[in-house]
Image (cartoon, rainbow, N blue to C red):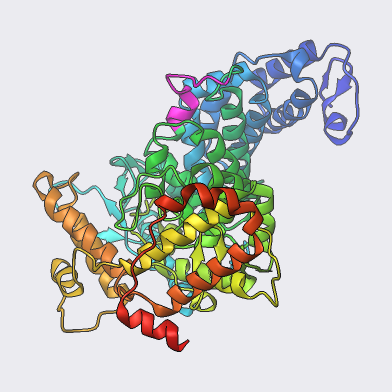
Amino acid sequence: QLKIGEFYLSPLLEIEHFKLSDPLLFFSNMYHVFLQSKTIETKYSCIKAMTKIYPKHCKEIGKFDDINYIFHLLKMARIKHERDLFLDFLKQLSLNKENARKLISVDALTYLVDLSTLAHLHVTRAIVPLQTLMLEGSYSNSFSYPEWFIDQTQTTSSAFSIEQLKEKYESGEIKDNTKIWAQGMEGWKLLEDIPQLKWTILDTGISVLNESDLAIVSLDILIQSCKFFPNINDQSAIIRPLPRSKRQLSNFRCLPHICQLLLTFHPPIVERVSILLNEIMLENPVLPQLYITGCYYFLLMYTGSNIGPIAKFLKSTHLKQGFNSEEKKRNNRISNSILSPVLPAALISYLESYDHIKFSEAFLGECDTPELIWSSEMRRYMMEKIALHLADFTPRLKNNIKSVYIYCPIPHIEYEVLKNELFCGRYYLKHLCDTVKFPNWPIVDIVQTLRDILDAWKEEVNKKMPTISLSEALKVLELEPEETHEDSVIRRTYLKLAAKYHPDKNPDGRQIFEQIVKAYEHLCNFSNKDYSPSTYNIRLILKSQSILFVNHKTGIKLVATSRASTLQVPRISHAHTNYFQRD
């Protein structure tokens, strides 16, 4: 039995409560034994003991000067058991701010992001039961997808799947120092330096942590490191330059992979990623480009109920995205939200009007009021539409965890239950006009509501055709205008042309690229839209105005009097007048 100070090492690992007279001295002696020991068992026991002691006596022990060496041992580990022990030890050490600072200085956060992406390989975790048959089929065949390239001098290398790489490694055709590349990697790397290949192809023993737990521990370290260095100081002033931890995690090498961890749908991982994104993106200059990672699609696909951090993140960022769309308007919060193609306008308004806790309750519940119509069936339908939109990407993560999602705008989701509803300001006018079911429904701001209804009236009678026609949009995407094309065909064609003419790859193709994006957005969002004034909608507008003026005449009397001379009522065509007379 190895004795350190007043404790034997083996019993120390088994008992929960113990007192140390001098925690710093005991911890230092333990670390010296770890360094000097020549047996693996003793080293493992020392690491476990230090991992157990440090969080209980963090303040007394203080910073750990050799944390960079522990990180080096983690990177050099070739056995899963060692990797897991060192990672767990680093998690406890990161509770100290100076230790976290040292980890940031050696770019440990980037390595931890790479390590966390192994969660995509956790095959024993439950799969979210919302995939279509096409998605389920894709998952079952995911490992046969050829995406890995082997560096072969003076010869053209074809792509290989993970299974083929395993066969080549076992036969000796490739070795630990063979250079490998796949989409999402910065350049050619040695096989032993690629986390996915290192921990799946090389003989690395039995792990203590499964892939999901590995990601959870890594994310805990990332979150703690970010909390130590906030983007805003105690005086509410924005800190510039951005803290180094946030700069590392918000660059293209890390941010897409952090967001793609949401596609594991594992509740502890999704919750931690949401918390981490809240920490990283607060007053971050890269926030307007966050939507390119696809994180908003990934977040809304989540089926769990622990959506508090998700709702908080959506509320603080959904209006700050720099996407381009024909529907964006200067003063319209709904159309300016990145969530507008996916969520009903009322749910976005609810997100803006209330705190994230109340939004979470509504999002998970059943609502049928003038303010919000939402149900679990609508949520399920939304998830299926997003899953179908991402169908050709999610299976790739099983084969290459470093794959990067190429952003593609999703067609507007049309909800059948909202087909005859007109949302205006903060209310559905059809429900608002149902005075039997919703008598005297409380209006938050009656004057603003009347203005919103008047704006809706103007917009309805002044509808205009889009700047590009359906046939022109199809021609831009090199599709036959006379034929009917499936959404999947249009999307694949768009991705192909967008990749060909993207300004980053083709500097002379910017103008064509912008035309391609505009054409695709038109096909996604406007091809099935009615551009003529709707008599049904105008009738709802007039009826709701009448009800509001009758029920709230006292509250609006003074305002109505002062603004009567400037009120401009839209002109209605003769056909609409006849319709209302008959009605």
- In the image, 295 versus 233, the foreground residue is 233
Q: Which range of residues does the magenta coloring cover?
A: 236-248
Secondary structure character of the magenta stretch overall: loop
User: Residue at 18% across / 61% down in the picture?
Assistant: 497
- With 13 as the anchor, is 235 left or right in this view? left
User: Residue at 46% across / 73% down in the picture?
Assistant: 135
x and y, in percent, of residue 49 in the image: 76, 28
- With 228 as the anchor, is 505 left or right in this view? left
- With 169 as the anchor, is 149 left or right in this view? left
x and y, in percent, of residue 401 in the image: 43, 52
**Residue 495 appears in the rendering:** yes
User: Residue at 53% across / 66% down in the picture?
Assistant: 545
x and y, in percent, of residue 47 in the image: 70, 28
- Magenta span includes 489: no
Residue that extends furthest to the left in the rendered view of this protein: 508
Residue that extends furthest to the bottom in the rendered view of this protein: 582
User: Residue at 43% across / 28% down in the picture?
Assistant: 247
**Residue 207 appears in the rendering:** no
User: In the figure, 20 relative to 405: above or below?
Assistant: above
Q: Quadrant of residue 65?
A: top right
